[in-house]
Amino acid sequence: MSTEYERVVLPIPDRRPAGAPEVSVEQEDLAFKPITPLRPPEGAPNILLVLLDDAGFGSSSAFGGPCRTPTFERLAANGLRYTRFHTTAMCSPTRQALLTGRNHHSVGMGAVSDMATTAPGYTSLRPNTAATIAEVLRMNGYSTSQFGKCHEVPTWEWSPMGPFDRWPTGSGFEYFYGFIGGETNQFHPSLTEGTTPVEPDRSPEEGYHLSEDLAAKARRWLGQQRALAPERPFFLYFAPGATHAPIHVPDDWLDRYAGEFDQGWDVVREETFARQKRLGVIPPDSELTPRPEGIPAWSRMPEEMKPVLTRQMELYAAFLEHTDHCLGQVVEEIERLGALDDTLIFLITGDNGASGEGTLNGTWNEALTMTGMTHVETPEFLRAKLDTFGTPESYPQYSLGWAHAMNTPYQWTKRIASHWGGTRNGLIVHWPRGITARGEMRHQFHHVIDFAPTCLEVAGLPQPQIVNGVAQQPVAGVSMAYSFDDADAPERRETQYFEILGNRGIYHKGWTAVTAHAPPVPDWPQRDFDEDVWELYDTTTDWTQARDLAAERPEKLAELQRLFLIEAAKYDVLPLDDRSAERADPDRAERPVLARGDRQRLYRGIGRLNAFSVINIKNKSHHVTAEIVVPADGCEGVIAAQGGLPGGWALYAKDNRPVYCYNFYGVDRFHVEGTEPLPEGTHHLRMEFDYDGGGVAKGGTVRLLLDDREVGQGRVEHTQPLPFASDEPFEIGRDQGSSVTSDYTVHEFTGEVNWVEIAIPVGSHDYDAEITTDERMRAALVTE
């Protein structure tokens, strides 16, 4: 067994026996030492890390929220609730910080990976000087696995060709099953096993839902690990895509909360606030912060919209309870295997505050709000779609008003790193063998960077100094183990900065100085950084940041503002960057892109390709050409497709005739059909789209050509100006995600597709430059 000193260098160097061996075994006086498999120190526990998505502090019943989470409550009753635990306010930064133990800017993730720039704190490149906790545990003898969401991969490394260094299997996880990116369809996910694209084993009609699939795969892995390597502790990271949009709920969960939110978001906030006081997750003298300007009172919302709004919240609550149910299956499997008492469970109830990206009315198709096409979703349209919300026929998100209520009692929402509504998330810690306390609260201030050092302490492992030959940067987190059995222990995290999209704050010994630079409400004044209005709170007496003391204590505010700049300089936060269009545009942000130029040929056998792997054809004329082989008895099915239900296009054969469909957000579908059948043999089928011009999101004329001879013509009246849903891929010879159109019933082409070429004709005008700053920012941020 290696010594503790050796474990500061990983992997642990192999040692040869000292001295010269004898010529034969018979002449050897001393037996060789037995082969000893690598193991962590005795007593190292199993670790289950659970990270939900976009669930605010005030959503789960374990922290006073209206959404029933019995698994959370069970774990809390037998463990600890941390009431002052914090995230970064955004997805990728939280996840990078969580796994590395370093502040998010110091590991290159100052924003989501989709908005990377060349500044050191914003490249999205996790440096090799910051090994993940998964890698450290694996190199010390743990079995490691990840299930669910990974949004830490730089966008130019998302393709099936990698590189895979920053994918889960390159970051310390021996097994990965989930999705790469910010969100995915819960019924038609873009799944990866290891680094290989895979398909769900059944359809939504057959009962498929991603959260259930992730739980089943995690349980299977646990069974294998306990059966084949029971002497090794495990580290399992369970990160479902829930409760991020799209809010998708299985059929038998759709009506679980019918009628429970008719009182509206203001009353729900007040009810949650009262429960939080009774539970003790906030002090009895806490104040409920006021509703921000820009979020109307429930009483001011139009009556005709209220059935739509209440339905959105009913579905969100069911979504969260269903997620709790799936987690419960994983916990039950650990218990069935006899490992629950010896498993440290870290359950973080969100990677940021609840999402305010659904606009005031919410949305039936998030892609509409993402691309600035909110005018399509009139109240009449939303009411007409009411029965499909939450089903595979929708891609919904709830209203900003509900998001604010799910962050009770705090101000603001996801992305607003200045205030607790964006950064404070409930934490439940459960470890029967290692923690004596049961059902208690812990009020020490902590942050996601504290998870990794906590794991190392409880496992008896040192923080490594060198990993894979590279000296490691210091870990910024502190272990939380000191507080496990001491509710009154002085907190060891005295200072923590926050910054996302210019929204920034600093915590120091109970005081917070904060400024909301760009909240998600209409008409927020745009300011330079030096014009931002700072607020000051003494959270030792004002738990919720309700009483601004900036005018009363200007000297304290100035002290904390200076401290923020010191921390910002230390951790690569500077230069502050609130650019939107520039950061959303890869060329202007100067980050690599996989697909460049005006022509791209893709060959059969290529897996599902995300939007970053395919050249952009929006807001311009373009051609799609396929070389196909038609059997003697004709053909059916998809030749090429990009996107799905939320929007996209497909070139396919129906009744052995070519057809092109453009799906405009699931609202309109335009079909252009060929006038003659496809003949047997090898042929070139081309779709030519002649863009109308005059701006973005315009229509165009479609021509279908077979071996350069026109066989069909039609119109597409309007198009989408920005990317289709981020998780819906480009595919050749099939459409395995949600369907672009129900017009084809055969999803796989029954002939052969040798290649597909996408081309932009010479001289085509590109109107992308006319896309507004706000539209680009929404498109980049909606996938957090």
Image (cartoon, rainbow, N blue to C red):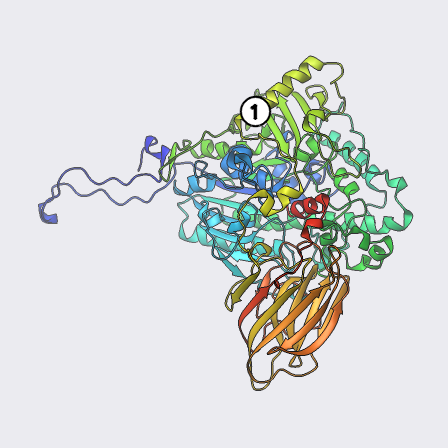
In the image, 606 versus 393, the foreground residue is 606
Q: Identify the residue position indicated by label 1 in the image.
A: 567
Image coordinates for residue 239, horizontal then vertical, percent? 58, 46
Q: Position of residue 171 (x, y in %)?
A: 46, 45
Residue pictured at 68% horizontal, 52% vertical? 768
In the visual, does 457 lie left or right of 147? left
Q: Is residue 257 visible?
A: no
**Residue 456 location (% of width, % of height):** 45, 33
Query: Which secondary structure, mark 1?
Result: helix
Mark 1 surroundings: few (<14), some (14-19) or many (≥20) residues within 10 A? some
Q: Which residue is at the front of the view, 253 or 500?
A: 500
- Does 314 sit above or below residue 744? above
The picture places residue 679, in percent across and down from the top left corner, at 60, 84
Q: Is residue 417 visible?
A: yes
Tell which of 350 and 642 is nearer to you. Answer: 642
Instruction: Give the image quarter of residue 750.
Output: bottom right
Q: Quadrant of the N terminus?
A: top left
Name the residue at 83% across, 51% down. 308
The mark total stands at 1
Q: Is residue 6 above or below residue 736?
A: above
Image position of 297 (left or right of 433): right
Q: Residue at x 65, y 83 (%)?
A: 677
